Image: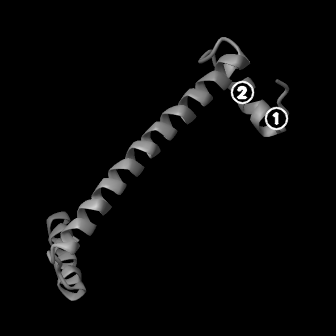
């Protein structure tokens, strides 16, 4: 596989090797790919959590367990004000 890198990325890779953090340019690239893999796992996990939360909300709504929008926003404003008060803002 051949990959073309911008001069900025090449300089960054070189600086990482020169700093002693990595023994070679390949190790810098491998570390970057591992970070990307980890980020993708986190996003995928969070996406699954959100789908589950949405499903719970839909099911609650179908059972008639809903709160009108004005009440929700009022409760959110109260929570926000409490946080501001606690932070001394």
* Image-based side of 61 in relation to 8, left or right: left
Give the vertical position of 67 relative to 58 (above or below). Answer: below
Q: Which of 64 and 89 is in front in this view?
A: 64
Residue 80 appears anywhere in the view: no
Number of marks in picture: 2
Picture residue at 83% right of the left edge, 37% below the top: 7
Q: Position of residue 64 (x, y in %)?
A: 15, 78
Kindly identify which numbered label has been placed on residue 76.
none
Question: Viewed as shown, does residue 10 lie left or right of 77?
Answer: right
Name the outermost residue toward the bottom. Answer: 70
* On-image quarter of the C terminus: bottom left
Q: Residue shown at 39%/43% (left/top)?
A: 45
Contact flag, marks 2 and 1 (Cβ < 8 Å): yes
Count neighbours of disc 2 (C-alpha within 10 A) and say few if under 14, some if 14 to 19, many if 20 or more: some
Near-viewer residue (45 or 83): 45
- In the picture provided, is 6 more to the left or to the right than 59? right
Q: Residue furthest top?
A: 23
SS class, disc 1? loop
Find disc 1 in the rendering and name its residue.
Answer: 5
Q: In this view, does 42 lie above or below 57?
A: above
Residue 68 seen in render: yes
Of the two numbered discs 2 and 1 on the same chain, state the one appearing first in sequence. Answer: 1
Q: Which mark is residue 13?
A: 2
**Residue 6 figure quarter:** top right
Residue 19 in the image, given as x and y percentages of width and height: 64, 20
**Label 1 crowd bin: few (<14), some (14–19), many (20+), radius 10 Å:** few
């Amino acid at each position: 596989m051949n990959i073309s890198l911008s001069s900025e990325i090449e300089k960054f890779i070189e600086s990482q090797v020169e700093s002693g953090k990595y023994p070679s340019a390949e190790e810098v690239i491998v570390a970057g790919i591992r970070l990307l893999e980890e980020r993708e796992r986190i996003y995928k996990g969070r996406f699954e959590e959100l789908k589950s939360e949405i499903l719970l909300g839909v099911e609650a709504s179908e059972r008639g367990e809903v709160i009108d929008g004005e009440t929700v926003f009022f409760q959110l404003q109260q929570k926000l004000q409490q946080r501001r008060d606690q932070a001394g803002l």
